[in-house]
């Protein structure tokens, strides 16, 4: 057994055994990290691979969360069916947004603005929908919290931890597979130089749209998780731009366009912000806004010192002298 | 020699500025044709029209009898036209091999096969050593070769070269010319090149097309055209007459 396999095995054991070892707080943090790693990976698929900046990614998460949430709330339909409806709804919105933008050649900053606009429209629309609870929010019945009920996706915190772990690993697997195939090469080519990519026979409209669709589907799936984990949904929170920024901070700090960057990034950020909040709390200081300030500082440090993100810097430090691109 | 590319009475204006007017010429299968002319003569516009970056206002462009104008650049590539850009546009953040692989994936379903082909092309263009380096670490001559490698990877029947020699030292230029001539002989694609470096035109092109103020003023065998007084005048100004080719 090589050192690499041993490390992987130990890592897997640690991840699987974590709920047995950790307390409730640590478990909730780990769940949050895994959730953010998934949404970050989805955002990274669009921006890091295909070069399409989304500043409104909370849109897809929120659509997913609300679709499955509403099905459960109104009709008692569980998340296993709800997730497919959520993906379908999210894909429709992504198709509309991407189709419109790419057909009319909207790119760069203007594309990013369009993604914000879509998220904001949706927030306002949901705020005015009584069926979805409006600004007062939608509350899913919590039911029991003692034993695992996989059918209704109800149970103790460890259930949600394992679900988030499964989602994060599944997304990592999917993104690895995509990035190593034709899609990955085409997306990176489009990201680097769209005109040159087109000159090499790549139908850029089709492949960019595909990136948005794939990203929205993953985001919607994590949205379904969010709905059943949090059990309450408010348009003001779910679709708010700060949520979209939270999604992209992980990959930006971890390393845009890399597979492990979003995971490193969300881990770092969560540890940093919650660690500091805990520390301040232990010292007896109440400083609201600490999290945001720390996010800002972390981002600033990365932009100045590690413009490619933390993970590529680690990779180069561990790795070879020749410049190579991190996975 | 059968007709491969046919440019028929093509015209293009930009807000009243006539970039091309009534330009017609042909390129045969496996033929090597150079487009020359002073700056602003419409050479790059001509390339952009062929590649589908812009649409002509008048006239038609056909490849093997199939209409090319009105298609998107990727569709033009799919019909068998590869191109390089005047200012090199490597995918900077991708490795050298991946740059070529993107081209080689065109029309190839299997990644492994495409990667092998990309490696073989890098070998031919003396870039194999640097396969795993990011393209942004390459020198200008290497970038030029990478640009060429990428275009060749799509297996073009017609290769459009937009000033591939510009910025190269004479020795580098000669090396690239030798490689190009060798590849062209073995693979048999036709070449249409825009070039200011006349040693490259002489070495590579069998035929020369001359553009001046958007109009075609000469079309014929290289040595004759390059000695044509009107061509020399358009290039060097009337003062240069009577003179030898530059």
Image (spheres, coloured by chain):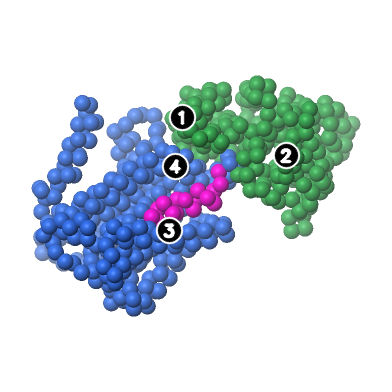
Chain colours: A blue, B green
**Which residue occupies 34% across, 50% down?**
A41
Circle 1 — which element?
helix
Residue A317 in percent (x, y) is at 30, 35
- Can you say which quadrant of the picture contains the N terminus of chain A? top left
Q: Answer yes or no: do the residues labelled 2 and 4 have beta carbons within 8 Å?
A: no
Kindly identify which chain the residue marked by label 1 belongs to.
B
Residue B63 in percent (x, y) is at 72, 39
**Which residue occupies 74% across, 58% down?**
B15
Circle 4 — which element?
helix
Q: Which residues are magenta?
A: A202-217
Numbered label attached to residue A91: 3
Spatial distance from mark 3 to mark 1, Cα to Cα?
32 Å
Quadrant position of residue A230: bottom left
Q: Is residue B91 visible?
A: yes
Foreground pick, A8 / A279: A8
Spatial distance from mark 2 to mark 4, Cα to Cα?
31 Å
Tag in front: 2 or 4: 2
- Circle 1 is placed at which residue position? B112
- Circle 4 is placed at which residue position? A184
The answer to whether marks 2 and 1 sit on the same chain is: yes
**Which residue occupies 28% across, 65% down?**
A77
Local packing at callout 4 (Cα closer than 10 Å; few below 14, some 14-19, many 20+) is many
The main secondary structure of the magenta stretch is helix
Answer whether residue A206 is magenta in the image.
Answer: yes
Q: Answer yes or no: do the residues labelled 3 and 2 have beta carbons within 8 Å?
A: no
Spatial distance from mark 1 to mark 4, Cα to Cα?
15 Å
Kindly identify which chain the residue marked by label 4 belongs to.
A
Please, is residue B47 above or below residue B192 in the view?
A: below
Q: Answer yes or no: do the residues labelled 1 and 4 have beta carbons within 8 Å?
A: no
- Can you say which quadrant of the picture contains the C terminus of chain A? top left
For marks 2 and 1 on the same chain, the one whose residue lies earlier in the sequence: 2
Local packing at callout 1 (Cα closer than 10 Å; few below 14, some 14-19, many 20+) is few
């Amino acid at each position: 057994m090589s050192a690499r396999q041993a490390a992987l095995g130990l890592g897997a054991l640690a991840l699987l055994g974590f709920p047995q070892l950790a307390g409730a707080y640590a478990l909730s943090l780990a769940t949050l990290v895994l959730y953010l790693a998934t949404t970050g990976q989805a955002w990274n698929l669009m921006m890091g691979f295909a070069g399409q900046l989304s500043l409104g990614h909370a849109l897809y998460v929120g659509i997913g969360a609300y679709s499955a949430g509403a099905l459960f709330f109104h009709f008692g339909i569980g998340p296993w069916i709800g997730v497919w409806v959520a993906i379908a709804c999210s894909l429709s919105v992504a198709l509309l947004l991407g189709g419109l933008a790419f057909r009319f050649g909207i790119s760069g900053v203007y594309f990013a603005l369009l993604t914000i606009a879509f998220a904001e429209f949706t927030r306002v629309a949901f705020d005015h929908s009584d069926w979805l609870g409006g600004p007062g929010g939608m509350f899913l019945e919590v039911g029991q919290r003692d034993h695992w009920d996989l059918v209704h996706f109800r149970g103790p915190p460890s259930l949600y931890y394992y679900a988030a772990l499964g989602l994060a690993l599944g997304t990592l697997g999917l993104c690895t597979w995509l990035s190593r195939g034709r899609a990955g090469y085409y997306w990176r080519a489009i990201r680097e130089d769209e005109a040159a990519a087109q000159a090499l026979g790549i139908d850029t409209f089709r492949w960019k749209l595909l990136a948005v669709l794939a990203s929205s589907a993953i985001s919607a799936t994590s949205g379904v998780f969010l709905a059943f984990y949090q059990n309450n949904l408010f348009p003001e929170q779910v679709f708010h731009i700060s949520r979209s920024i939270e999604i992209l901070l992980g990959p930006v700090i971890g390393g845009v366009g890399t597979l492990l960057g979003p995971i490193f990034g969300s881990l770092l950020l969560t540890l940093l912000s919650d660690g500091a909040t805990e520390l301040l709390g232990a010292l007896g200081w109440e400083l609201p806004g600490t999290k945001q300030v720390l996010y800002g500082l972390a981002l600033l440090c990365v932009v100045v010192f590690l413009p490619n993100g933390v993970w590529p810097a680690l990779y180069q430090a561990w790795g070879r002298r020749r410049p190579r691109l991190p996975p | 020699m059968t007709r491969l590319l046919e440019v028929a009475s093509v015209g293009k204006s930009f807000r009243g500025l006539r970039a091309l007017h009534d330009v017609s010429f042909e390129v045969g299968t496996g033929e090597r044709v150079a487009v020359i002319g002073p700056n602003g003569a419409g050479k790059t516009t001509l390339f952009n029209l062929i590649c589908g970056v812009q649409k002509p206002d008048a006239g038609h462009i056909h490849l093997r009898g199939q209409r090319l104008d009105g298609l998107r650049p990727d569709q033009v590539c799919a019909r068998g036209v590869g191109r390089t850009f005047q200012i090199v546009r490597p995918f900077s953040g991708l490795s050298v091999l991946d740059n070529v692989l993107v081209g080689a994936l065109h029309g190839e379903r299997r990644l492994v096969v495409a990667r092998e082909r990309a490696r073989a092309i890098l070998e031919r263009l003396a870039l194999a050593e640097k396969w795993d380096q990011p393209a942004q670490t390459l020198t200008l001559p290497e970038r030029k070769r990478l640009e060429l490698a990428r275009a060749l990877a799509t297996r073009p029947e017609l290769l459009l070269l937009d000033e591939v020699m510009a910025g190269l030292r004479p020795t580098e230029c000669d090396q690239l010319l030798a490689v190009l001539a060798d590849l062209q002989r073995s693979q048999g694609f036709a070449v249409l090149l825009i070039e200011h470096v006349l040693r490259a035109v002489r070495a590579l092109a069998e035929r020369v097309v001359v553009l001046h103020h958007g109009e075609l003023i000469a079309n014929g065998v290289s040595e004759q055209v390059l000695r044509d007084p009107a061509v020399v005048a358009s290039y060097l100004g009337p003062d240069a007459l009577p003179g030898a080719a530059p």
